[in-house]
Amino acid sequence: MTKMFKIALPDGSVREMPEGSTPADVAAAIGPGLAKAALAAKIDGEVRDIMRPFEGDSNLALITSRDEKDALELVRHDFAHVLAEAVQNIFPGTQITFGPATDDGFYYDFAPAPGRGPFTDEDLPAIEEEMRRVIAADKPLVREVWDRERVRQFFIDHGETFKAEWVMELPEGEPITMYKTGHGRPTGSTFAAGRTSRRPASSIPTRSS
């Protein structure tokens, strides 16, 4: 018999969902409009990827663009990772460090490939064009759970020395969530403290999404 989880919604209703279901499935069950509008989910108060399966009985609140504060932070977080993916696409060999959303936008720190020199304002039009292409591709976001050593080795193999060092600061034995775009192996190298929405960017290891 399929195990069922009780999912409590903000209006006080409770939906029973089979094990393996996601917040996106709940949104779809409620209606196609909500399924399209839902950006992320709050599970027992924690913001998570809308495609991450429930782990047990949960309190669920779906985040849409009407939830202005949460939605704006998600969009800025996503755009930071789109920026990182775009820069690595058009400037191979670039390493990235960190780049969260901020109160008024987003950013990412880059270490240019040897011999390239610093980025300048003249690079921005090409970066912006590539960001639009990445967004338009709308590739699926695939979530995997890796151990710390596997993540570290991945970054070593891909020349991401900053990330390889950073991951070793995480507790040994703690699972790390790894996101990638499409269905191939991860190709980017961006870290996030909480990757949550459906807009895929590059490969994003995180401890909380």
Image (cartoon, rainbow, N blue to C red):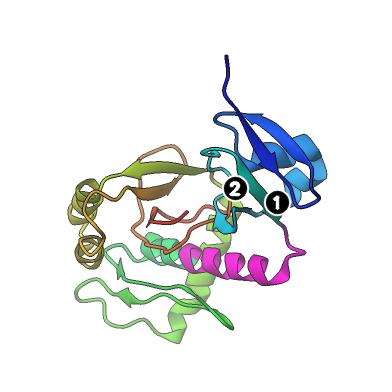
Picture coordinates of residue 48, whole percent (x, y): 54, 53
Give me the residue at 24% from left, 66% from top. 166
* Contact (Cβ within 8 Å) of mark 1 with mark 2: yes
What secondary structure is the magenta-colored segment mainly? helix
Left or right of 134? Residue 90 is: left
Which secondary structure, mark 2?
loop
Q: Residue at x 34, y 66 (%)?
A: 91
Q: Which residue is drawn at 39% across and 56% down?
A: 206
Quarter placement of the N terminus: top right
Say whether residue 39 is left or right of residue 87: right
User: From what the image shows, is residue 172 above or below residue 1?
Assistant: below
The answer for how far apart the CA atoms under marks 1 and 2 are is: 8 Å
Extreme residue in the top direction? 1
Q: Is residue 81 magenta?
A: yes
Does the magenta portion include 174? no
Position of 146 with respect to 141 (left or right) is: left
Q: Give the range drawn in magenta.
A: 64-82
Q: Is mark 1 on a helix, strand or loop?
A: loop
Query: What percent of the width, then of the height, locates residue 140?
Result: 54, 43
Q: Which amino acid does label 2 sit on?
A: Ile
Residue that appears at 37% across and 61% down: 190
User: Disc 1 marks which residue?
Assistant: 38
Q: Residue 50 carries which label?
A: 2
